[in-house]
Amino acid sequence: MRRYIITAFSILFSVSLIAQNHKVKEDSIKIRQFYNAALVKGQAYKWLDHLSNSIGGRLSGSLNAQRAVEFTKAELEDLGLDKVWLQPVMVPKWTRGAREHAYIQTGPGMTTEVNITALGGSVATSPGGLKARVLEVNGIEDLENYKADIKGKIVFYNRPMKPELIQTFEAYGGCVDQRYSGAEAAAKYGAVGVIVRSLSHKIDEYPHTGSMSYGDLPNDKRIPAAAISTKDAEYLSGILKLKKDLEFYYKLSSENHGEVQSYNVIGEITGSEFPEEFIVVGGHLDSWDLGDGSHDDGAGVVQSMEVLRLFKETGYKPKRSIRVVLFMNEENGLRGGNKYAEIAHSKNENHIFALESDAGGFTPRGFSFEADDAQFAQIESWKPLFKPYLIHYFERGGSGADIGPLKKGDIVLAGLRPDSQRYFDHHHAATDTFEHVNKRELELGAATMTSLIYLVDKYGMRHIDLETDKKL
Ligand SMILES: [Zn+2]
């Protein structure tokens, strides 16, 4: 009798193993199809060409941002999705105005030009510009050490990104407060302006812009904020050691115009079995204005559109509803991400998974996930399917700014993680342009995203019931 039971068990085990193997095979064939379709006749690069070269930089509230809304909506409509719509959202409008101008003055008539860019959200200098002595600090915490010396000066934040960090986003994270909150902090000590070393590893002439905030500073206390190139930051720091009383001049003509109407662009393939379960894939449609926003985040936009196109092209009919969401205003307000989540939550839509691509169009390495133990174990079980494509990075960590507000209940959030070593050479600078995106790298990213969305759609997401601590 015992033998029969053992035999019965082993037959059952073998049957389930065969079924399991069959599924793995089916999945690996499907994933191969996605990569083939993306690499042989992908659309992502063509879309990016239009977004970057025919439209260009897409600052929130600009005409180019509106053109990008119209272009991507029309392209999604051409894919024959079940629904395509615009989701209205109010966004801040900030304009740079006339080109910035800056120089270092070491004596009467002795000036050296500096490459400078206003930070997004900065007020202008007076029409004649601002000239003052400079105080260099190593980050916001350093202000306290010089507090008696700051009044009437321009604070120069010069903490560099740490080159030894392999994860370049960590190096960025260690410095970005200088750009974002540096003006607010320095104004409280009586500074008249701030200049920030550009957030880039590369020593070159290109200044990198990015968002900044005055927090709750009243209007009359707001001081103009700008970034200078890393090369100029090194030069200024060096010359300050020799000549402490040098003066720095800069002129900004930027302006805040309040809020204007804009849109998130959304397309959906409605699920065949579980239409009430939603999976989101997206990037942000807005960009800075110095380059054409190809890496940040044109790449994420076209890769996300490509996910739905690849499903269509390979004849995959999702069980769950798959939405591509092209978010507006990630760079200087996150209004699009907040609006999408607000509406999803108010309608009680059941979002089970969201994936964002917003780390450049470079060679994909994998993903990072915000997931519980059971969810992450399930995701890790898919890792071997990605091995042939050299995708190996499956870690827990942050996902993407635009999908962050969706966090509620059991949803899993994920971010595509491309190679990040060159990202900050281009990030928010005039060099974030189409020619710096490699076609194959972009396409590999799109196929990698499609494969993950396919697996989530096919198997759903497990989670732990917090009441009973059981896997569901
Ligand atoms: Zn971005």
Image (cartoon, rainbow, N blue to C red):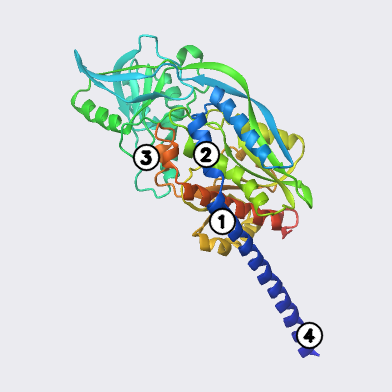
Other residues around mark 4 within 10 Å, as few (<14) / some (14–19) / many (≥20): few
Q: Amino acid at mark 3?
A: Met
Residue density around tag 2, few if under 14, some if 14–19, many if 20 or more, within 10 Å: many
Mark 4 close to ligand 1, CB under 8 Å = no
C-alpha distance separating marks 1 and 2: 18 Å
| Distance Cα–Cα, label 3 vs label 4 | 64 Å
Please report whichever mark, 3 or 4, sits nearer to the chain's N-terminal start: 4
Left or right of residue 240: residue 184: right
The residue positioned 55% from the left and 60% from the top of the image is: 386
Q: Which residue is mark 3?
A: 161
Q: Nearer the viewer, residue 176 or 26?
A: 26
Q: Which residue is mark 4?
A: 5
Callout 1, which amino acid?
Answer: Tyr
Q: Could you tell me residue 431's position as x and y percent?
A: 39, 35
Q: Report if the CB atoms under discs 1 and 3 are less than 8 Å apart.
A: no
Nearest to N terminus: mark 1 or mark 3: 1
Whole-number angstrom distance, CA of label 1 to CA of label 3:
35 Å
- Residue 35: which disc? 1
Label whose residue precedes the other's in the sequence (1 or 2): 1
The answer to whether residue 246 is seen in the rendering is no
Closer to the N terminus: mark 4 or mark 2? 4
Mark 2, residue position: 48
The amino acid type, in three-letter code, at marker 4 is Ile
Q: Nearer the viewer, residue 219 or 127?
A: 127
Closer to the chain start, of discs 1 and 4, is 4
Which residue type carries mark 2?
Leu
